[in-house]
Image: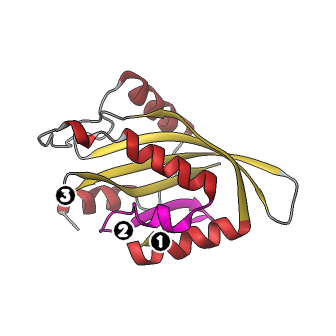
């Protein structure tokens, strides 16, 4: 794991986003500003847009395709916070089991992005999503917001973090 990513994970470990932090993220996303300070700007090419990766994430959530989501995970792993009241870190191989368990217990009714940083400059791209779902043993619909973070890996965007907000 590179030093920048390790420092970012350490800084965020064990912290929940406050409503003020979520509002600040929304504002930064709406204005197209980089959210994390210090992201170096690597050379860009037309095929580096984060938008298609966010679209693949949405399609995989909608279809409940655990392996499709696991295939998008960054080689340094996936950090998930806000799920079951604790943070977890999953290697790409472990991520398929995390998503499989998630989709066995829940059925996605709707997964849509409110805002994405499709043309993000720097090493990270962020998006806010709404996930509407229900447990397989219940008719009660649950709506949740997710903050997803993509990180560059060998010139491609990969899924690095999911924060589930209450």
> In this view of the protein, which residue sits in the foreground, 62 or 42?
62
Mark 1, residues whose alpha carbon is within 10 Å: few (<14), some, or many (≥20)?
A: many
- Tell me whether the residue at label 2 lies in contact with that at label 1, contact meaning CB atoms closer than 8 angstroms: yes
The numbered dot on residue 62 is none
Determine the residue positioned at 22% across, 41% down.
Answer: 122
Secondary structure found at label 3: loop
Label 2 to label 3: alpha-carbon separation: 15 Å
Q: Is residue 9 left or right of residue 47?
A: right
Which residue carries the number 2 mark? 77
Which residue carries the number 1 mark? 95
Residue 46 image offset from top left, x and y in percent: 21, 36
Q: Where's the N terminus, which quadrant?
A: bottom left
Magenta includes 84?
Answer: yes
Residue 23 image offset from top left, x and y in percent: 51, 31
Which residue carries the number 3 mark? 154
Determine the residue positioned at 54% across, 55% down.
Answer: 60
Mark 2, residues whose alpha carbon is within 10 Å: few (<14), some, or many (≥20)?
A: many
Q: Residue furthest left?
A: 43
Residue 84 image offset from top left, x and y in percent: 64, 66
Magenta includes 117?
Answer: no
Start-end of magenta stretch: 64-88
Instruction: Looking at the image, tell me whether mark 3 or mark 1 is earlier in sequence order.
Output: 1
């Amino acid at each position: 794991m590179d030093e920048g990513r390790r420092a970012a994970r350490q800084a965020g470990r064990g912290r929940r986003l406050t409503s003020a932090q979520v509002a600040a993220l929304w504002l930064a996303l709406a204005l197209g500003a980089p959210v994390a300070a210090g992201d170096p700007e690597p050379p860009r090419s037309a095929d580096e847009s984060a938008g298609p990766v966010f679209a693949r994430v949405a399609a995989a959530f909608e279809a409940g395709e655990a392996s499709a989501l696991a295939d998008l995970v960054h080689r340094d792993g996936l950090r998930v916070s806000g799920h079951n009241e604790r943070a977890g870190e999953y290697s790409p191989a472990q991520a398929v089991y995390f998503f499989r368990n998630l989709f066995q217990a829940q059925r996605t009714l709707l997964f849509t992005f409110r805002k994405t940083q499709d043309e993000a400059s720097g090493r990270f791209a962020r998006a806010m999503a709404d996930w509407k779902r229900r447990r397989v043993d219940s008719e009660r619909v649950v709506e949740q917001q997710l903050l997803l973070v993509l990180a560059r890996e060998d010139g491609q965007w990969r899924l690095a973090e999911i924060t589930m907000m209450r």
